[in-house]
Image (tube, helix red, strand yellow):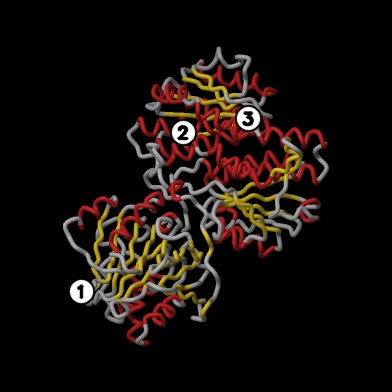
Amino acid sequence: MCGIVGYVGSKQATPVLINGLKKLEYRGYDSAGIAVLSESSDEILVRKSKGALKFLEEKIADEVIKGSVGIGHTRWATHGEPSDLNSHPHTNVSGTIAVVHNGIIENYAKLKAWLQDQGVVFKSQTDTEVIAHLINYFYEKTGEIFKAVLETLHRLEGSYALGVVCTKYPDRLIAARKESPLIVGVGDGENFIASDVPPVLEYTREVYYLEQNELAVLYNDHVDLFDSEGNKVVRKPSHVDWDLSSAEKGGYAHFMLKEIHEQAKAFTDTLRPRLVYEGTEPSDIQFDEIDFNSDWKEAGRIVITACGTAYHAGVVGKYAFEKFARIPVSVDVASEFRYRNPILNKNDIFIVISQSGETADTLAALRLAKQTGAKVIAITNCVGSTVSREADEVIYTWAGPEIAVASTKAYTTQLMCLYLLAVKLGKERGTLSSDEYKNLISEIALIPEKAQQIVENQTEIQKFASKQFNKSKIFYIGRQFDSASSLESALKLKEVSYMHCEAFAAGELKHGPIALVDSDTLVVAIATDPELYEKLASNIVEVKSRGAVTMAITLDKTGAFNSCCNEVITIPETNPALASMLSIIPAQLFAYYCSILRGNDPDKPRNLAKSVTVE
C-alpha cells in the first residue's frame, strides 16, 4: 500500500525521488520522506513529513540536498500513527543505514524486544525501524552490507519490499521483496527501484519484476540479482510498452475521468487479440493463453475469488458462466476464503481476479487453491505481477495503467475477459448453439463503440449529480446481472464521494431495507433485462411513494420507467446479458461528479490505497 522509489546514477537524486513519489500518490499515503547519501559528507540526509507530499516539498524547498543515491517513501500507517517521526525512511542509531519498507513485519515486537535488550534505542512506533537496527547489528557482525541485509531478511516474518542505503557503500542501493511488489528500472548510467512502473517510465522502459524472496543490488552502471541465499540470478529485463502519456492526465481534470473515458479503447485492446474475424464479421473467440482442454470441458465447478471491485466483477462472471456455459459457480471474497478451510476439488477451475496482481488476500487464496491441485487462472492487468507468475494460466486485461485509486477501466476489462471466457466455454461445452454463439460475439464486438457513446453523452448524468450530491442515503437496486452491477456502482460512490450508499437485490427491499427510505434517499435502479422491467418498476414505485428520488439506468427505449423515475439514463441497446459492461459507466460518471461537487479529490480518496498488498 505504501510507495517506494530509489535512485542510483549521475543525476541529483532528490528531484528524481520526489517526481517518483508523485507518480505513486495514487496508492494512498499519510506521510512522505526521502533519504539521500550526501556527496559532500559521510552522512545520510533524511527529510520527512506528515501529510501530503507538498509538505515535504515545502520543507526542503530552501535546502540544497546534494547526492546521487537515495530512497523515498510514501507511507500508509499500519504500526504507529501518522507523524513526522513515524514517517519513512528509518535509520539505525548512528544514521549510517537508512531503510524504506512496504509491508508488515509480523514478528517485529519480538525482534524489537531483543534489540532493546542489546541496548538499541528506538525513535518511532513503526515495525520498519526494526529492520534498520537489525541490518546494523548484522553489519557490525559481518562487516559487509549485503550480507547484513541477507541475514536480516532471514529473520523477518511477514511481507516487505525494501530499499536500503548505507554511508559505507555510497555507490549502491540494495532492494528486496517478499509478498509486496517491487520493480527495478534499468536505465543508461542510472538505475531505479519503485513499487510500480509509472515512476520509471520517464527514464526507462526496461524493468526487472523482482520475484518472491529476491534481492537486487543497484549500481549506476549495472544491476545484480540474487536469490534468498545470496546466489546470483541471471535473466533479461522485461520491456514495458506503456505510452508515457497514458500515465499522465492528458488534459482531463482527474485520472478517474480520463480512465472512464478510456474504457472504449481499453475494451478494444482487450478484444483485439481474442476475436477471430471472417471478413469483417467476428466469428470466434480465441485465447492463446488458455488451453480449453478436458480440464475446462469436464470441470464440475468454477470458483472465483477476489477482493473489492474485482470481487464484484466475479459476481457478474458467476451470472455469465452459469447462463452461457451452464456450469455452477461460487464466488468468494478472498479475505474470507483463505481462512474458512474451503472445499476444493481437483476438477474445479479456480479463477482469481486482481488489477495489480499483488493483492495479498487474493495471492493467499491462489496459493491455497494450488495446494489442492485445482487449475488456477488469473485475470490481471499487470504483466510480471506475482499473481501472473504463480497462476497456471494468465489472462491479461490490457487496460493500460490505471492511476486513480477507484477502479473503472480495470473493472470493465475484467468483465470483458469474464464474458469472453463464459461465451467461449459455452461453445466448448455445447450449451450455446452456433447461432447463439455468433450473435453473442457480434454483440460483444460492438461494446467499445457503445461505451464511447455513453461517455460522449454524459451531460444528463452530470446535471443529475448536481442536484443529488447532498443526499444522505443512496441505494442501488437491480435484479440478476443488474444486482451484481449494483454492488460495484454503490462501491464507486462510496469510495470517491463518501456518501453512504448500499446495494440491494431489488426483490429484497421489502425484507428490511425499505425501512430506511425517506425524502433524503436516492434510489438508482439498474434495469437491463426487459423480462424484469415490470418487477423493477414496481420496486421503484414503492420507494418513490415513500419520498425517495429515483433514477433508472436502462436499455429500455419504450418509456417503461418515465412515469416512476425522476431521471432515466438510457444506454445503447445490447444483449441484456452483456449490459453489465455498459450500465456501470453511468454509475462511474455519477460517482465522479458527486465527488468533485462535494469538494473531494476522486483520484485519491481518503483512507484508501490502490493496491492492498498487506492484510
Spatial CA distance of label 2 from label 3 is 17 Å
Q: Are marks 3 and 1 in contact (CB under 8 Å)?
A: no
> Residue tagged by mark 1?
40
- Residue 388 lies in quadrant: bottom right
Q: Residues within 10 Å of mark 1 (few under 14, many from 20)?
A: few
Residue 554 vertical position relative to residue 354 in the rendered view, above or below:
above
Residue 291 vs residue 596: left or right? right
Total of numbered circles in the picture? Answer: 3
Label 1 sits on what residue type?
A: Ser
Q: Nearer the viewer, residue 579 or 537?
A: 579
Q: Secondary structure at mark 2?
A: strand
Q: Position of residue 428 (x, y in %)?
A: 80, 46
Could you say whether the residue bearing mark 3 is in a helix, strand or loop? loop
Tell me how far mark 1 sits from mark 2, CA to CA.
56 Å
Report the amino acid beneath label 3: Arg
Query: Which residue corresponds to the image point at 20% horizontal and 75% vertical from the top-left?
Result: 41
**Residue 144 shown left or right of residue 239 in the figure:** left
Residue 510 occupies quadrant: top right
**Front one among 200 and 375:** 200
- Rendered residue at 38%/58% (across/down): 78
Circle number at residue 425: none
> Which residue ends up furthest to the top in the rendered image?
563
Q: Cβ–Cβ below 8 Å for labels 2 and 3?
A: no
What residue is shown with label 2? 501
Q: Earlier in the sequence, mark 1 or mark 2?
A: 1
Q: Who is closer to the viewer here, 529 or 121?
A: 529
Say what amino acid the circle numbered 2 marks: Cys
Residue annotated with mark 3: 479
How far across and down, in percent of the image, does residue 190 sit?
A: 38, 68
Per the image, label 1 sits on a secondary structure element best described as loop
